[in-house]
Amino acid sequence: MSTKDVFQNSKKQIWRKWSIAFRILPTAILIVILKFLAHEFKLEVMELNALFTSLVAGTIFLIGFLISGVLSDYKESEKIPSELAATLKTVFDDTIAIYQMKKTETALQFIEFQKSFIDDLFNWFYKKEKTKSMLQKITSMTDFFVKLDNEGLQVNYIIKLKNEQHNLRKMLLRIDTIRDTEFTGSAYAIVEAMGFFIALGLIIMKIEPFYASLFFTILVTFLIFYMFLLIKDLDNPFEYSEKGEGGTEISLKPLHDFEEELKDFVLSKN
């Protein structure tokens, strides 16, 4: 690996790790400016009290509730690309075995179909292909199964391919559900509102010395907004159309590896 590749990989890893923090920077800078203005123009009219600290604690509790909810879906989502790649790999291997046994034109056509399907799959992940179209492509696999059955292929191969077709359809529908379903939208709304009022309260709150007040204002607001954006990202781990395969999005490496395998594959017709 060249020095340039190492640098590019390091840059991607840094961005993946700190992308949310970079997105919060404009908000943090705005809060600092507002805090300085409030201090300069004597707008710090509120004193620190137990009610405000209870509000902060309640917000942190609600954030913990939200993140525990989205993490269960996220952990399940992490398995899907590898399972999807395994299903596609199984279908491909079985098709190669069928061709080697039967030397049929249908098997060759099915191999070419699978090579185009992986491209369509990536387009679907990036929302350049509709879910309805992908489901139709999966259904069209049945045409190949019927032709292979008419050519005398053993029934157990047909059953196995149909099972993998079912698994493929099920995983695509699961991904589609995860990326189109928002976890407890009303809970997001209340966290947004509480985060805003906490930031406002810290800006107009008088704590001496001033720089200690500025430090805690930045720290608390940064933590709340960071966790909120993290939860939003975890809630949709398949949002590749906006940010690509970075941040908290699930890695598609198993599918990329399978795509490379398809490109490098050379079918022996002897």
Image (cartoon, rainbow, N blue to C red):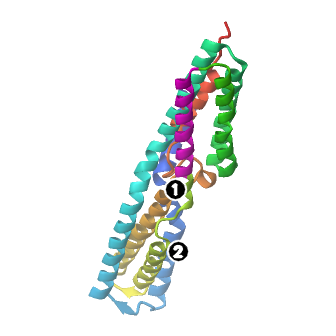
The residue at 58%/26% (across/down) is 92
- The residue singled out by tag 2 in the image is 30
Q: Residue at x 64, y 46 (%)?
A: 135
Q: Amino acid at mark 2?
A: Leu
How many discs appear?
Answer: 2
The residue that mark 1 highlights is 178
Residue 185 point in image, percent of width and height: 50, 71
Residue 189 x/y as whole percent: 49, 76
Tell whether 124 sits left or right of 219: right
Disc 1 secondary structure class: helix
Asked if residue 182 is positioned above or below residue 257 in the image, the reply reads: below
Taking the image as drawn, is residue 137 in sight?
A: yes
Image quarter of the C terminus: top right
* 151 relative position to 64: left or right: right
Q: Bin the neighbour count of mark 1 within 10 Å (Cα to Cα): few under 14, some 14-19, many 20 and up.
A: some
Q: Amino acid at mark 1?
A: Ile
Residues under numbered marks 2 and 1 in contact, where contact means CB atoms less than 8 Å apart: no
Distance in Å between CA atoms under marks 2 and 1: 34 Å
> Which of the labelled discs sits on residue 115, or is there none?
none
Position of residue 250 measured from the top left corner of the image (x, y, whole percent): 49, 47
Residue 134 shown in magenta = no
Nearer the observer, 226 or 260: 260
Upstream in sequence: badge 2 or badge 1 = 2
Residue 206 x/y as whole percent? 36, 87
Q: Residues within 10 Å of mark 2 (few under 14, many from 20)?
A: few
Local SS, label 2: helix
The main secondary structure of the magenta stretch is helix
Mark 2 or 1, which is nearer the eye?
1
**Residue 89 in sight from this viewpoint:** no
Q: Which residues are magenta?
A: 154-175
Q: Could you say which is closer to the camera, residue 198 or residue 184?
A: 184
Is residue 38 placed above or below 90 in the rendered structure?
Answer: below
